[in-house]
Image (tube, helix red, strand yellow):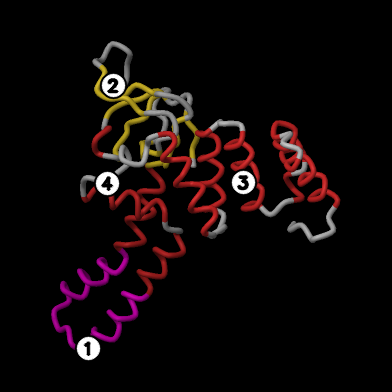
């Protein structure tokens, strides 16, 4: 539930934060998670982790706050600042069309994909009388479902991950393979589902390859 202005839980948390007892503040937040709005819970954790210079964890919770519907200039500023401090902003730059597809498909909610498909379907219904060939009608109908179908496919087969520490990227799913790249701590990347402890990075394109599943959190 959301906190009201007189909540004793909120008062206690603010007291810990004000006194710079960030480790205790984090534990207090975790112990009272159900008393906080999810977005506010993650945002408060992120700020405390940032104060403790635990930047990958700070970014993780800033991202979770954003995904929970918390939009503010302060959040955007803090998130960008954490990314700059970790030096991952340029590393994550999109360099291919594939990068944009994964970013868009996994970032937007399924509700958005369904809405786009619905709008296209309504347009198709209005145009049906002008289309005489049956195969063309089938083709257009299939295309109207493409946004939702594509998004569901991406969400089913890929995850957005955040590296908690430096991770090696190899040419194959085994330590015997040659190192291909390195994922820096705090970097966000898109990878396949867990495959015997390994994931294949598909985006950003500059870091394609296999990496161990540990030392990373799923966003």
Which is nearer the N-term, disc 4 or disc 3? 3
Which is nearer the N-term, disc 1 or disc 4? 4
In the image as oriented, which residue stretches furthest toward the top?
176
Start-end of magenta stretch: 119-145
Spot occupied by residue 56 in the image (x, y as percentages of width and height)? 50, 33
User: Which numbered dot is residue 170?
Assistant: 2
User: Which numbered dot is residue 42?
Assistant: 3
Q: Secondary structure at mark 4?
A: loop
Which is nearer the N-term, disc 1 or disc 3? 3
How many residues crowd mark 1 within 10 Å: few (<14), some (14–19), many (20+)? Answer: few
How many residues crowd mark 2 within 10 Å: few (<14), some (14–19), many (20+)? Answer: many
Q: Label 4, on which residue?
A: 94
State the image quarter where residue 122 is shown: bottom left
Spot occupied by residue 219 in the image (x, y as percentages of width and height)? 49, 42
Q: Foreground: 198 or 168?
A: 168
Q: Nearer the viewer, mark 2 or mark 1?
A: 2
Q: Are marks 2 and 3 in contact (CB under 8 Å)?
A: no
Q: Label 1, on which residue?
A: 129
Q: Nearer the viewer, mark 1 or mark 4?
A: 4
Which is nearer the N-term, disc 2 or disc 1? 1
């Amino acid at each position: 539930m959301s906190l009201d202005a007189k909540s004793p839980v909120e008062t206690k948390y603010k007291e810990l934060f004000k006194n710079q007892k960030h480790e205790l503040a984090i534990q207090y937040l975790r112990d009272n998670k159900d008393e906080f709005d999810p977005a506010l819970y993650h945002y408060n954790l992120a700020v405390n982790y940032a104060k403790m210079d635990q930047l990958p964890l700070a970014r993780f919770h800033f991202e979770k706050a954003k995904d929970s519907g918390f939009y503010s200039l302060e959040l955007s500023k803090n998130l960008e600042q954490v990314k700059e401090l970790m030096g991952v902003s340029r590393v994550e730059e999109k360099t291919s069309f594939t990068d944009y597809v994964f970013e868009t498909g996994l970032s937007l909610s399924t509700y958005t994909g369904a809405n786009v498909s619905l709008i296209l379907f309504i347009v198709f219904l209005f145009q049906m009388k002008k289309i005489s060939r049956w195969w063309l009608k089938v083709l257009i109908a299939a295309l109207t479902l493409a946004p939702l179908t594509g998004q569901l496919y991406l969400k089913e087969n890929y995850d957005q991950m955040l590296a908690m520490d430096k991770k090696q990227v190899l040419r194959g799913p085994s330590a015997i393979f040659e190192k291909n790249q390195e994922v820096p701590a705090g970097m966000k990347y898109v990878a396949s589902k867990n495959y015997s402890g390994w994931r294949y990075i598909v985006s950003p394109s500059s870091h394609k390859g296999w990496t161990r599943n540990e030392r990373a959190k799923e966003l």
